[in-house]
Amino acid sequence: MSQVQPKPEELPLPGREGLRLRIEARIRKLERASGNGLWSMVCFLLISFAAFNGFSFLPELSTEVRNLLGTPPPAEMISLALVVYAFSGIVRTLARMSRNIKPYLGLMHAAFFTAFYLFYHLSGALQDNFWAVFFAGISVMGLENYYLWTHSSAALHKERALLASMQEKRAETE
């Protein structure tokens, strides 16, 4: 059996050059991470535009599919689940912010709020509850993206300062 070999970029390089390359890789990773939160927000906004029109671009579900899915939950139960999810999402984000724990990227939030749109759509109550889902999603995902951006910015500042310090020391020794 063969063992899994580390990727070339994961192999330790000797000395300062290896450290510099690892710092640059962390900088690129942090830059990508800060952009990923925005992509989840864009995804949520696009789905919200579709939900605003009642998903009119999608075909109607056949009676067979509706029978297979069963009776949709009442709008009150969906609303209760939405309130609980939004509240817990905000509390979890605030808890991570207070303890400076790595932020979440938010794609799961977009998926859950999409599910709320779909549940309301299937129950026939989307038009009455669209704004509740929209503002809950904007609140949770906005807070999450704000934390992701500030956390990534602080980490990028540290990494860039470390890289600049290394380059200054290198210039002094040459």
Image: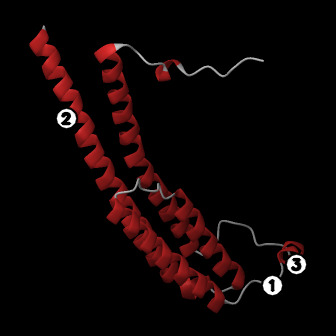
In the picture, measured across the screen, residue 169 lies left or right of residue 96, that is left
Disc 1 residue crowd, few under 14, some 14–19, many 20+, Cα 10 Å: few
Q: Residue at x 52, y 78 (%)?
A: 133
Picture layout, residue 63 above or below residue 27: below
Q: From the viewer's perspective, is the residue at label 2 or at label 3 nearer? A: 2
Q: From the viewer's perspective, is the residue at label 2 or at label 1 nearer? A: 2
Amino acid type at circle 2 is Ala
**Gap between marks 2 and 1, in whole Å?**
58 Å
Amino acid type at circle 1 is Thr
Dividing the picture into quarters, in which one does residue 165 lie?
top left
Task: Identify the element where label 2 is drawn.
Answer: helix
Disc 2 residue crowd, few under 14, some 14–19, many 20+, Cα 10 Å: few
Mark 3 lies on residue: 67
Residue 102: horizontal and vertical position, in percent? 41, 53
Q: Earlier in the sequence, mark 2 or mark 1?
A: 1
Which labelled disc corresponds to residue 161? Answer: 2
Residue 148: horizontal and vertical position, in percent? 37, 55
Residue 63: horizontal and vertical position, in percent? 87, 77
Residue 147: horizontal and vertical position, in percent? 34, 60
**Gap between marks 2 and 3, in whole Å?**
61 Å
Dividing the picture into quarters, in which one does residue 159 lie?
top left
Mark 1 lies on residue: 71
In the picture, measured across the screen, residue 156 lies left or right of residue 83, that is left
Q: Residue at x 38, y 29 (%)?
A: 25
